[in-house]
Image (cartoon, helix red, strand yellow):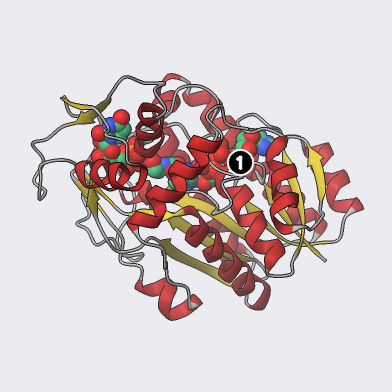
Amino acid sequence: MSILVTGGAGYIGSHTCVELLNAGYEIIILDNFYNSKSESLNRIKEITNKDFKFYEGDIRDREFLDNLFATENIEAVIHFAGLKAVGESCQKPLEYYDNNIGGTVTLLLAMKDAGVKKIVFSSSATVYGSSNPSPLKEEMPIGGTTNPYGTTKLYIENILQDLCKSDDEWSVCTLRYFNPIGAHKSGRIGENPNGIPNNLMHYITQVAVGKLDHLNVFGDDYDTHDGTGVRDYIHVVDLSIGHVYAVKKVLAETGINIYNLGTGNGYSVLDIVKAFSKASGIEIKYEIAPRRDGDIATCFSDPSKAKNELGWVAERGLEEMCEDSWRWQSENPNGF
Ligand code: NAD
Ligand code: WQD
């Protein structure tokens, strides 16, 4: 029996595949390489010294999915595949609704018809919107998302809730990620988006390798300890290990469970700049710029539910996140 990993060639997916293989699971990866490279699959094999099957295809392609489920013995799905750039989603909302919501509904229909009713879903802290105070807890009301990307995560969460209400055979684990950064210790896999970077750490590493001149710090007048935005950065390997715990949960029980995957610590933009400079020995040039639309001052998790119910805790600190981000970027300046 295998775990199907959609989007397994991507940033979080590739790290999760390493942890699943290390934990002894058989996996099958499905990806269309929209935002990833096939080299990441070679690197997963290199790191783990284990093999797996790969299908190149699209989660919106029902015939392809039906053939895959008919051919393979799949026990559960970890569903990473989707588009994730907040800014781009405002320019191309239909593409985001089609890929993320349409793709997920097609995948769920294929799973239902194949009798595979166990899924771990990649959601995001963005579903908490802007009115809940941090630390954010799973039982807080969700909604009020400020961009189409966030809204796709919100709708998919609702779809999964409705599905579990309609049929008690489903087993769903919705994971709300905070801000994943870092890379595998080996320096062989890491974040490699196509196009312009979207997230803070990627901008910082691009400045460090000289591809960007400086970092724009979006606002220094927030109500935080130094005026810059505060987030809950989590090492991607900790996040990935969280999926191994979540898979165990969906394999063992039915029903829907939602967990924050974060550290519970908030760091500001300038804290990250300082920590990265220390880890890399490179000074990061930055300029204070206006606030970015849709940003909030502070967002960090209460991770205690995942600790109490899954037994999972993030163990890697900020220094290690920065060192590992830097190792990946400096050893692979052009990505894969
Ligand atoms: P990523 O872009 O690196 O990985 C996504 C993968 O899915 C890519 O390999 C891409 O090629 C593939 N893909 C996209 N559309 C597909 C389709 N229709 N069919 C098949 N494959 C497809 O992104 P990531 O950072 O690894 O994120 C993984 C998941 O986690 C996404 O759903 C994302 O929204 C979610 N998430 C990410 C973050 C973050 O900050 N990285 C935070 C919260 C949630
Ligand atoms: C972090 C902080 C910025 C870039 C987004 C998505 C969320 C999830 C994670 C999903 C903020 C500041 C950033 C820069 C800066 N994504 N910043 N200069 O916005 O917390 O979350 O990524 O898949 O859904 O919304 O992450 O890394 O963009 O920003 O000053 O060049 O860094 O203002 O305070 P964010 P981020």
Is 50 left, or right, of 252 in this rendering? right
Query: Dividing the image into four equal quarters, which quarter contains ligand 2?
Result: top left
Residue at 20% x, 49% y is 298
Residue at 15% x, 32% y is 219
* x, y percent for residue 91: 43, 19
* x, y percent for residue 315: 42, 68
Residue at 41% x, 34% y is 202
Which residue matches tag 1?
Answer: 10
- Vertical arrangement, residue 141 with respect to residue 304, above or below: above
* x, y percent for residue 301: 31, 61
Q: Determine if the C-beta at disc 1 is less than 8 A from ligand 1.
A: yes
Asked if residue 11 can be seen in this view, the reply is yes
Q: Of helix, strand and loop, which one carries label 1?
A: loop
Q: Nearer the viewer, residue 34 or 191?
A: 191
* Occupied quadrant, residue 283: top left
* x, y percent for residue 107: 70, 46
Residue at 10% x, 45% y is 226
> What's the amino acid at mark 1?
Gly
Q: Nearer the viewer, residue 141 or 202?
A: 202
Image quarter in which the C terminus is found? top right
- Vertical arrangement, residue 204 with respect to residue 289, above or below: below
- Mark 1, Cα crowd under 10 Å, few <14 / some 14-19 / many 20+, is many
